[in-house]
Amino acid sequence: MRADSRPRPGGAVAVGSYILKRTLGAVPLLLLISIIAFSLLALAPGDPLLAIRLENPRAVSAESIARLREYYHLDDPIYVRYFHWLRSVLAGDWGYSSVYKTPVMELVHSRVPNTLILTMSAWLLGLLIALPIGMVSASRQYSAFDYIVTFLAFLGLSMPPVWFGFMAIMLFSVKLRWLPIGGVSSMVTGSSWAVFVDRLAHLILPMIVLGLVQVAYWVRYVRTSLLEVLGMDYIRTARAKGLDGRTVLTKHAMRNAMIPVLTIAALDIPYFFGGAVVVETIFAWPGMGRLMYQAVIGGDYNLALCCLMLLAVLTVVSNLIADVLYAVVDPRVVYS
């Protein structure tokens, strides 16, 4: 992808060709990530069958453990185990979870919707808060509002999400009793509206904690990007022609300032899934983040590998979305 002042040839065909090339180029990258992830988990200390042994030590005989080790190729070299795992994955079989005693894909299918709801709502909340605050802060540079926003942004950047989550629980759940402490629902029965309100009440705290931590970063980025654009010659020309400040800001400056902001926002989508590990654990939210944490802690290698590969795929897709959005907001970009 490159910037060019000429008309964009090909239109949708060029975009489709570019997406296809990027997708094919991502295949070797994902293979490399799978090799690294598999090797790190395989070389980690501990026994993959430890959970089975501890569950019922008397019922699990040495012969059963030996058969399981042979079935999972645990005594083979790492590269042999990797190729057996890769062959099963390409066939759609991610194996069984040693902790949950359930096929891995069944667990993933049950948790992905909850994580999507949490992360996408937090991502949207962060954008809706960061964009207007960053715009006002840049348009009123060195004002009292700008100094307050800058102070709060640096405060937010230095605030650990764990501490923020616990403080939110203490204030809104324990002291004020406005919102539930955790979980995804209270098993409310009745009308669909009552169920929706209950799920929304459980979503508010984790969504705010996950979204506001990123707001501090985005506000600074929006402010810096907009200040850079406001100092350009075409903005001074627009003001010299008599355009009011709001028109200059919204119709001329923000369009160019949004180019890097949208790119960063799209690239930060994997961060929200990574941050969901902490937030979902704090609020007992049954999503992919908490599932990955429990898989790593419990030595559930099949489940941990599946979660890591999904995060890798999400990162590749987010990079592709960022490139496409860049071309949407910047007509100078052409695909080649």
Image (cartoon, grey):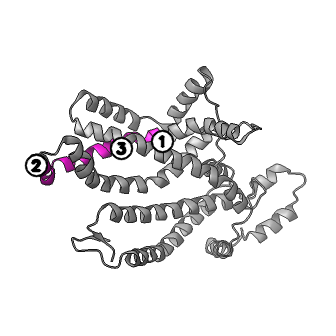
User: Three-letter amino acid code at disc 2?
Assistant: Lys
Q: Residue 88, labelled with which disc?
A: none
**Is residue 296 visible in this depiction of the protein?**
no
Query: Can residue 236 be found in the magenta stretch?
Result: yes
Q: Residues at badges 1 and 2 in contact (C-beta under 8 Å)?
A: no
| CA gap, disc 3 and disc 2 | 27 Å
Looking at marks 1 and 2 on the same chain, the residue that comes earlier in the sequence is marked by: 1
Residue located beneath label 3 in the image: 131
Q: Which percent across, then down, holds residue 174?
A: 62, 23
Residue nearest the viewer, comparing 76 with 240: 240
Tell me the crowding category of disc 2: few under 14, some 14 to 19, or many 20 or more residues within 10 angstroms, Cα based: few
User: Three-letter amino acid code at disc 3?
Assistant: Leu
Foreground tag (3 vs 2): 2
Q: Which percent across, then down, holds residue 333?
A: 29, 68
**Residue 234, placed above or below residue 186:** below
Residue located beneath label 2 in the image: 241
| Callout 2 secondary element | loop
Q: For the N terminus, give its image quadrant.
A: bottom left
* Image: magenta residue range: 212-238
| CA gap, disc 1 and disc 3 | 13 Å
